[in-house]
Image: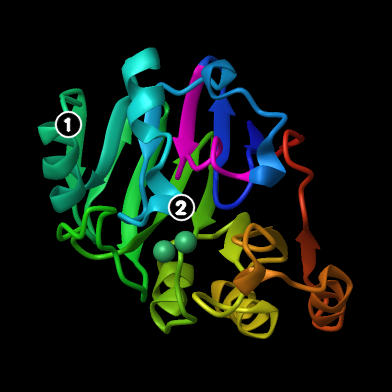
Amino acid sequence: MQLTYYGHSCFGLSYQDEHILLDPFISPNELAKGIRIMDIPANYILLSHGHEDHIFDCEAIAKDKNSLVVANYEIISWLSNKGITYVHPMNIGGKKQLGAFTVKMVNAIHSSCLPDGSNGGNPSGFVISVAGKNIYYSGDTALHYDMKIIAELYKIDVAILSIGGNFTMDAEDAVVAAQWLNVKNVVAMHFDTFPYIAIQKQKAQEIFTNQGIGIQFMEIGSHITL
Ligand code: NI
Ligand code: MN
């Protein structure tokens, strides 16, 4: 299984010849200039919530790649009105098999309105299971106690956590999240894209190292094998 970082909160997760794309926000991201959205494989696009910095490139990629778009019911209704018809709505607590992947939509504490102010339902995260591994993708969220429930239900191998602060957890909260999730491998997201979420990576690194938890700041365009 391969995890590729496309900047901000956008990741690709590939297993054999199947590809999930999470929260595509690439073309407006100065830091992701080197990424061409049409080169990104995407059988499935998962959206954690309705904010523009998570859905901006969804329409273009979904239409080009004929990707199945998976999100909460409200976001799916909104996208359907834009002519995206290959869709699957779900809601928090629900589980869906997508090829080799099992995706569970889980709680997040945040907001979710769509770019035009439409109701974007509730924000979410995902637990993605494939090839005997479980990956937790927090979405934009505050630290919350449901992370303990996730750890009771799943042995999480890797947690992808928002750590930029201001709108979400910062590194101090994210390290507690990792402890509650009982995970030793964290991949950072939602940092440095905008001035509000600029972080000091070295400081964040220290906070994790002090607790014996590994954190990776992936280079945009790079991938790791899980
Ligand atoms: Ni957001
Ligand atoms: Mn965001």
Q: Which SS class for mark 2?
A: helix
Front position in the image: 51 or 141: 51
Residue at x-position 31% and y-position 71%: 111
Provide residue 193's location: percent of width, then percent of height.
Answer: 64, 57
Looking at the picture, does residue 112 appear above or below residue 52? below
20 drawn magenta: yes
Q: How is the image coloured?
A: rainbow
Q: CA distance from mark 2 to mark 1?
A: 18 Å
Residue at x-position 56% and y-position 59%: 156
Question: Looking at mark 2, is its residue's CB closer than 8 Å to ligand 2?
Answer: yes
Residue at image mark 1: 82
Residue 53 disc label? 2
Give the quadrant of the C terminus: top right
Residue 131 disc label? none
26 drawn magenta: yes
Nearer-N-terminus badge (2/1): 2
